[in-house]
Amino acid sequence: MFGDIMGMMGKLKETQEKVKATKERLNTVLIDETSSDGKLKVTLTANREIKSIEIDDSLLQDKEQLEDYLVLTLNKAIEKATNVNETELAAVAKDGMPNIPGMDSLFK
């Protein structure tokens, strides 16, 4: 009985380390999103940290238009980054979970 508990605790610790390593690796995974007309480009990490924003000079003439472009393009980039982040972390968590009947449905 205690061997099972110790084994599960060891597996949990190993999984925590893998999650931490995955989060660190996701800082190096870059997500690019460009507006439909190419006038705005944003780059985020898979951990949703903005790395760069490139703005076409023509957008600098209209504050409201620029704001709209930023909101739309950043939201699309954040959605992509979130999907990558959640997929990667779920895979690590699923791999590290003990085999408990019914738990596998949580990670589908």
Image (tube, rainbow, N blue to C red):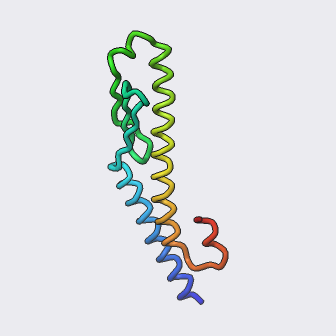
Q: Position of residue 14 (x, y in %)?
A: 43, 71
> Residue most toward the right?
102
Instruction: Give above or below for 98 relative to 61.
Output: below
> Residue most toward the front?
37
Query: In which quadrant will I find the N terminus?
Result: bottom right
Instruction: Give above or below for 91 relative to 29.
Output: below
Instruction: Give above or below for 102 relative to 61.
Output: below
Q: Position of residue 11 (x, y in %)?
A: 48, 76
> Residue most toward the top?
61
Query: Residue visible at 45% across and 39% down?
Result: 77
Front one among 90 and 18: 90
Query: In which quadrant will I find the C terminus?
Result: bottom right
Please tell me in which quadrant of the rendered image residue 97 appears.
bottom right
Front one among 105 and 58: 58
Query: Residue visible at 56% across and 82% down?
Result: 5
Query: Residue visible at 37% across and 28% down?
Result: 38
Query: Residue visible at 32% across and 49% down?
Result: 28
Q: How many marks?
A: 0
Q: Position of residue 17 (x, y in %)?
A: 41, 65
Instruction: Give above or below for 21 relative to 94.
Output: above
